[in-house]
Image (cartoon, grey):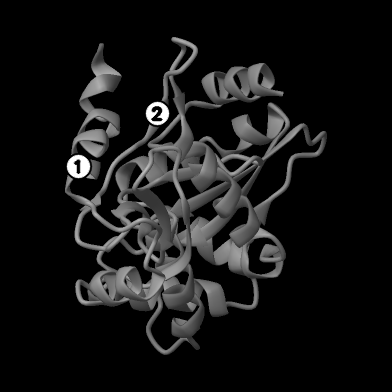
Amino acid sequence: MHFLGRTILATAVAMTAFTAAAKPDQAAIERKLGAIGLTPTSITPSPIAGMNEAVTERGIVYVSDDGGYFLVGHLYDNAAGNPVNLTELKMAKINKDKLAGMEDEMIIYPAKNEKHVVTVFTDTTCGYCRKLHSEMQAYNDAGITIRYLAFPRGGERSRNFGEMSAIWAAKDPVKAMDAAKGGSFDASGQPQRADLVRKHYELGVAMGVNGTPALILEDGTMLPGYQPASRLSQLLDSRS
């Protein structure tokens, strides 16, 4: 099955043969992950003996008790013969917690009869982001509130980083976003919120965003890529 190409279960089991530590050496794990630019915010045992789940600013990695081996990928629980993506479940909870209280930083297009709320990491130069935006009324009519966070895909090197900074600093961010998605926004001479756009971009990276649009559902699950309003509405209704 296709999902087995992504699972790390068999590899992780094989790797445990190389770990001699009886219990996790947190200092060693932090030191060795830190040497490659990963800073764990939590280290907890995984379901596999000898392997631990380390939550970092760039997602979840699985690391041996002595920090000498690590794996990046999705861990599945297949004990009941019905694979459950444990990594995705954990990341969804983390994502939901990260978004809590950020409403004041979002550019929001509210649905009059709101049934669902979807947070979208968006880029003003992304074709599919523009397509999604052009269909905003359809999302709202389907009861879906869309909330934007900034994700210029190249970070501060993006040619539209300044544009997105100006949008978030505008007196009317909704009007500015509409103009930018239509290709008519002029950011020259405008005040900017580079700090906020940088924060959103770094948040997206930490949540695993690697392209736009990236849709974050209310439970924290990430849905990459454009989804037409009718399909997204059906998906959200089925999940609820």
Q: Residue furthest right?
A: 113
In the figure, 97 relative to 48: above or below?
below
- Residue topped by disc 2: 76
Q: Position of residue 196 (x, y in %)?
A: 51, 78
Instruction: Note whether 99 is above or below 196 in the view shown.
Output: above
Label 1 crowd (10 A; few <14 / some 14-19 / many >=20): few
Q: Residue at x 56, y 80 (%)?
A: 169
- Amino acid type assigned to the residue bearing label 1 in the image: Ala
Work out whether residue 195 or residue 88 is closer to the camera in this orientation and state it.
Answer: 88
The residue that disc 1 covers is 17
Q: Which of the image's four quarters has the C terminus?
A: top right
Q: Residue at x 58, y 44 (%)?
A: 220
Disc 2 is placed on an element classified as strand
Distance between the alpha carbons at the discs numbered 2 and 1: 20 Å
Residue 15 location, x and y as percent?
19, 42
Residue at image location 58% in from the left, 21% down from the top: 235
Location of residue 146 in the rendering, given as x and y in whole percent from the top left corner: 62, 45
* Between 92 and 174, the one nearer to me in the picture: 92
Residue at image position (26%, 34%) is 13
Q: Residue 203 shows which numbered tag?
A: none
Question: Left or right: where does residue 178 sit relative to residue 158?
Answer: right
Q: Are marks 2 and 1 in contact (CB under 8 Å)?
A: no
